[in-house]
Image (cartoon, rainbow, N blue to C red):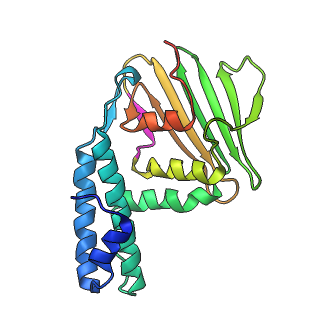
Amino acid sequence: MTLISVQAFYDLNLKNGSARDIYDLIQSLRQSVLRQRQRLPREFDELAHAPSVRVEDAEMLARTREYLAATRARFAELDAGTSPMTSTEIRDLHFTTRMAALKRATFDLTAHERGQRVVVELTPQTLRRYNLYLPLTMPRTSQQIAGPTPIRRAQFRQALTAIHLGEWANRYAREAASQVQWRLALDYGFAFLPVTFSGRDRFPYNFTKLIELFNMPLPAA
């Protein structure tokens, strides 16, 4: 598939397409997303040996998902009914629609009982970040997220959505003795029930994206 802009894709495939054509295109794009995801590693066991994902593959998957979203939107505009979705797509959509209600995201990453906790709080006015070291023997500090490219609330939610947490399992673990443990907790206040992902010596394939988002170094062994 050649990468073109979403607008160009719309003009070429959707603008004058019939409901039947667009429905068939939805099915084709769903299969394309599935094939591209299957080419990526599902999970891995060591942070030091995180699987490398080719930039071209990641860009292709992201753009195909954009094509699929645009195609579904066009199908809805034509009042053609509801396009079918897999259980994984439905779960991921739930995370996307609930992201606006996210109040707090807490990410723990520890090795040999030492590590770091990052708490990101999203208020109507600002995004606030707390850094704590594990075990919790140091005082809590707070700061406005800042840096070369400050992250705002909408950008944080967008970046978290782009990880596609709905495709993750809630628990990743090996039976061997634990070296690295991690936990991601999402708090939506009173809007929705909280959601937690965790693991022990096993990680989803794009786990390093989460580490980058929270600007957290790998814990020392």
Residue 88 location, x and y as percent? Answer: 37, 56
Q: Looking at the image, is 59 positioned above or below residue 204?
A: below
Residue 129 location, x and y as percent? Answer: 69, 37
Residue for point 28% across, 45% down? 56
Q: Is residue 161 left or right of residue 53?
A: right
Q: What stretch of residues is rendered in magenta?
A: 168-173
Residue 105 location, x and y as percent? Answer: 62, 43
Q: In this view, does 76 lie to the left or right of 84?
A: right
Q: In this orientation, which residue lies closer to the viewer: 36 or 189?
A: 36
Residue 145 figure quarter: top right
Q: In this orientation, which residue lies closer to the viewer: 146 or 87?
A: 146
Residue for point 61% across, 24% down? 116
Residue for point 49% across, 37% down? 210
Residue 170 in magenta stretch: yes
Q: In this orientation, which residue lies closer to the viewer: 76 or 171?
A: 76
Q: Looking at the image, is 82 positioned above or below residue 216?
A: below
Residue 56 in magenta stretch: no
- Residue 78 visible to an observer of this rendering: yes
On the rendered image, what quadrant is the N terminus found in? bottom left
- Residue 84 visible to an observer of this rendering: no
Tally of numbered tags: 0
Q: In this view, does 177 lie to the left or right of 23?
A: right
Residue for point 59% across, 48% down? 156
Q: Is residue 164 left or right of residue 213?
A: left
Q: Looking at the image, is 93 positioned above or below residue 117?
A: below
Residue 42 figure quarter: top left
Residue 203 figure quarter: top left
Residue 7 location, x and y as percent? Answer: 38, 70
Q: In this orientation, which residue lies closer to the viewer: 24 or 111?
A: 24
